[in-house]
Amino acid sequence: MGVVSLFLCIVEQIFTSSKKTQFRGIFMAKVPKDKALEATKWAIEAGFRHVDCAYAYNNEEYVGLAIRSKIADGTVKREDIFYTSKLFSNSHRPDLVRPALERSLKNLQLDYVDLYLIHFPVSLKPGEEMIPKDENGKVLFDTVDLCATWEAMEKCKDAGLAKSIGVSNFNRRLLEMILNKPGLKYKPVCNQVSALSLLSFLPFMPLFLSYWPSIHSFSPTDLCKREDSREQSLCLEGHRGFLLVPGLEKSYEKVL
């Protein structure tokens, strides 16, 4: 492949069992629309089964088309694919959470996602713009209780629209806020963070793991200084214990 940015990961599968399961994961951020269809098809044909995407990546329609085409031609069954999507910051208000997930499902033409995450813990004003701004170019933030957002996420799980729910880019305080929320029905199954952020998370790792959410690390090869297969392999080996989702953006041009 040239640039080795897709790797086999051995992870603790906490979503449905305690078995250790092999996942080949791909991270779809920065993969443009015109490449997403063929890149996803190639990844599935190559044996990758965990597809990490998001509404904000603006390519779910093409990723979903690729998944459906590989199901249709018999390469995989739907249950073979572990699909992650994410709730963007302009849909944190509780009444917007389910519509946001349903919008992703409509784009994907799938009945459910395997994992749905709160993408960022920063809330933005709702609207058509992903990053809403005023006339002076200032970003318009929103005031939303993330505990209320989480309750809406729990309802999505109850409705069968998401098999599991979790968070992304949460720090210790925010994760504790959710985990210690009165009336918590479902704990976040994971906290997905950038590999570059893992160093700052290490002091709090015992806390995170004591509550049993797993740590997902996306783009782990960003820690490497060179696009060298040996260096990237060592980088990934140093992250055992985390579910790694290496980015596809560094390799899709060399693959297609």
Image (cartoon, helix red, strand yellow):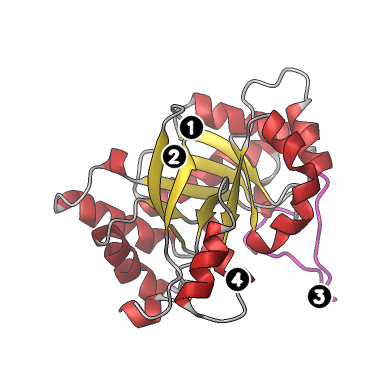
Q: Are marks 1 and 2 in contact (CB under 8 Å)?
A: yes
Q: Are marks 3 and 1 in contact (CB under 8 Å)?
A: no
Q: Who is closer to the viewer here, 96 or 70? A: 70
Vertical position of residue 253 compared to residue 52: above or below = below
Name the element at disc 1. Answer: loop
User: Which region shows up in magenta?
Assistant: 125-144
Question: In whole angstroms, how far apart are the C-alphas of marks 1 and 2?
Answer: 9 Å
Looking at the rendering, in which quadrant would you find the C terminus?
Answer: bottom left
Locate residue 199 relative to residue 76 in the image: left or right. Answer: right
Q: Amino acid at mark 4?
A: Asp
- The residue where tag 4 is placed is 222
Residue at screen point 46% across, 28% down? 18
- The residue where tag 1 is placed is 15
Q: Are marks 1 and 4 in contact (CB under 8 Å)?
A: no
Residue at screen point 70% across, 29% down? 210
Looking at the rendering, in which quadrant would you find the N terminus?
Answer: bottom left
Which of label 3 and label 4 is nearer to you? 4
Name the element at disc 4. Answer: helix
Q: Who is closer to the viewer here, 229 or 155? A: 229
